[in-house]
Image (spheres, helix red, strand yellow):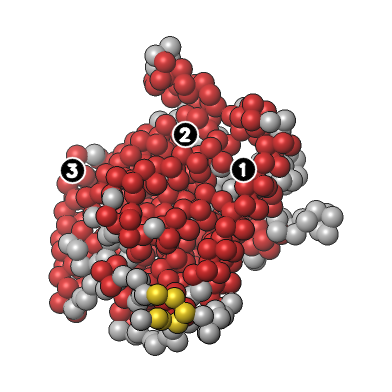
């Protein structure tokens, strides 16, 4: 029997179609009650153990922990799907809004080379009160998210176009990567530039080339997963090797130049693709992956600061402690510098409240977007978050005098720089609206057989990390990790198949 191409191209094996986990009002209440008992108990215990925590700042920090941990508890109790964006943000939020400020105080860990508040706990507590109000708005926006399930018109997905356009896009990307290697004088020159610390400055002005050149691993991975999903579902060892190949290729293509996001994001997107298209990933497997990811991030921090000297630790010629002392990289830096914005956001808010810094009124957002415009079109750039943030941290005029702060302030931190406390609260509401839309799209990818949502949802899923990112980081992520594959998907959805053609059903 023959089936039209449009029908065949839109179908997935029924066993690969998942459904969002149904939850009740009782589940919400039980999780909130559990969080309301657990987090205050943990805070009280820690305060008994460490006198520095016997301060009022611990109260709003604990309130933030209770508000955000509800989603994390639902995830742990399997009341939410493993890659549910709201649940994953809840897991991340427990660290961002609760654990990180407490660890800052307990470890006495603060931003370097900065004159901080007289009492950092006061600044953390004030920011925590702001976060608590914002998290309430975030939660209110998300309340009706599970009930609304709008109907979507199912658009046929043209698999032949997907394979053809995807292959062409991958070929163009590989060609761009060859051009990049040629610019650096071959493989040895490329490796030298990527691993040479200061030599990475030679990448200046190659932004769009890098975007194209580093797209092929993810595109090829998506093509292979879609084309051979049945084989991969039956042969898990091959699937594991495919994910490892993606990680290794992506590290060589983009990770060598000292950017962890170039190595980590494609792997997370790839795992979600596998989850939606091939085989469900268990919570245990995900936790094991996160453990390896933490070790990688810790080791990569040394590489980012010391380059290939990090191999001395592997050879045994230098200890990890020596590398840590030389580079300033240690576990607290990973937990409270790379994976948290609590201290820097508290500092920015303190500067604003004490009138030591002026509001930017949105100018940093304009500057963050300006990098998309070529220099010959816009030679004079508006102040971005680097310029504004430098003046906030080191005082007005610091940027013009040559100081540069490359810190990342996070969603709420940049909002405070521009619009003060009101901006921070508004950023949480906007985050809630975005998470709500992405959750709906992800739920659609789970319950429908359509290939389009299943391919695009993993990239959109990554919005859960917005609280740790500035606008320029977010735009760069969308252009680099979403746009290439999304363009291929768009063409596969909008180029109509030949309705006269027919193929044999599988």
- For mark 3, what is the residue? 48
Q: Residue 405 — which label? A: 1
Secondary element under disc 3, as helix, strand or loop, is helix
Is 430 situated left or right of 232 in this image?
Answer: right
Judged by depth in the image, the label closer to the viewer, 2 or 3, is 2
Closer to the N terminus: mark 2 or mark 1? 2
Judged by depth in the image, the label closer to the viewer, 3 or 1, is 1
Quadrant in which the N terminus appears? bottom left
Judged by depth in the image, the label closer to the viewer, 2 or 1, is 2
Secondary element under disc 2, as helix, strand or loop, is helix
Q: State the residue lying farthest toward the front.
A: 1
Neighbor class of circle 2 (other Cα within 10 Å; few <14, some 14-19, many 20+) is: many
Marks 2 and 3 sit apart, C-alpha to C-alpha, by 34 Å
**Horizontal and vertical percent position of residue 187:** 64, 30
Q: Residue 301 — which label? A: 2
Quadrant in which the C terminus appears? bottom left
Q: Which residue is drawn at 33% across and 56% down?
A: 231
Closest to the observer: 392 or 445?
445
């Amino acid at each position: 029997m023959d089936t039209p191409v449009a029908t065949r191209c839109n179908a997935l094996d029924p066993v690969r179609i998942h459904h969002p986990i149904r939850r009740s009002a009782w589940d919400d209440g039980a999780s909130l009650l559990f969080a309301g008992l657990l987090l205050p108990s943990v805070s009280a215990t820690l305060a008994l153990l460490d006198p520095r925590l016997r301060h009022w700042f611990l109260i709003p920090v604990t309130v933030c922990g209770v508000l955000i941990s509800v989603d994390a508890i639902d995830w742990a109790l399997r009341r939410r799907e493993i890659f549910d964006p709201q649940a994953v943000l809840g897991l991340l939020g427990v660290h961002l809004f609760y654990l990180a400020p407490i660890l800052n105080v307990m470890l006495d860990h603060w931003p370097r080379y900065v004159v901080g508040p007289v009492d950092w706990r006061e600044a953390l507590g004030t920011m925590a009160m702001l976060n608590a109000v914002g998290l309430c708005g975030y939660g209110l926006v998300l309340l009706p998210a599970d009930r609304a399930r709008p109907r979507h018109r199912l658009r046929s997905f043209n698999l032949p176009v997907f394979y053809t356009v995807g292959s062409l896009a991958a070929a163009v990307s590989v060609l761009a990567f060859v051009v990049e290697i040629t610019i650096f004088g071959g493989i040895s020159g490329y490796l030298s530039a990527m691993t040479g610390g200061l030599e990475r400055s030679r990448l200046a002005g190659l932004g769009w080339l890098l975007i194209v050149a580093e797209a092929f691993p993810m595109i090829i991975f998506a093509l292979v997963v879609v084309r051979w999903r049945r084989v991969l579902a039956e042969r898990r060892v091959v699937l594991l090797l495919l994910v490892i190949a993606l990680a290794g290729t992506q590290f060589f293509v983009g990770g060598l130049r000292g950017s962890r996001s170039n190595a980590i994001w494609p792997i997370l997107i790839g795992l979600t693709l596998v989850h939606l298209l091939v085989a469900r990933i268990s919570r245990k497997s995900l936790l094991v992956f996160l453990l390896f990811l933490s070790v990688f991030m810790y080791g990569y921090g040394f590489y980012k600061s010391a380059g290939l000297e990090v191999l001395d630790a592997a050879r045994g010629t230098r200890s990890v402690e020596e590398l840590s002392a030389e580079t300033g990289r240690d576990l607290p830096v990973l937990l409270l510098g790379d994976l948290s914005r609590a201290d820097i956001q508290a500092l920015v808010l303190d500067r604003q409240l004490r009138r030591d810094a002026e509001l930017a009124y949105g100018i940093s957002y304009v500057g963050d977007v300006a990098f998309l415009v070529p220099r010959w079109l816009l030679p004079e750039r508006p102040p971005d978050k680097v310029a504004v943030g430098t003046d906030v941290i080191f005082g007005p005029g610091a940027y013009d005098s040559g100081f540069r702060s490359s810190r990342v302030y996070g969603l709420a931190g940049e909002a405070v720089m521009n619009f003060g406390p009101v901006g921070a609260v508004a950023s949480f509401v906007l985050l809630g609206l975005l998470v709500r839309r992405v959750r709906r799209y992800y739920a659609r990818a789970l319950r429908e057989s359509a290939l389009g949502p299943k391919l695009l949802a993993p990239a959109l899923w990554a919005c859960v990390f917005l609280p740790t990112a500035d606008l320029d980081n977010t735009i760069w992520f969308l252009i680099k990790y979403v746009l290439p594959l999304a363009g291929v998907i768009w063409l596969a959805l909008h180029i109509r198949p030949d309705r006269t053609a027919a193929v044999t059903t599988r």
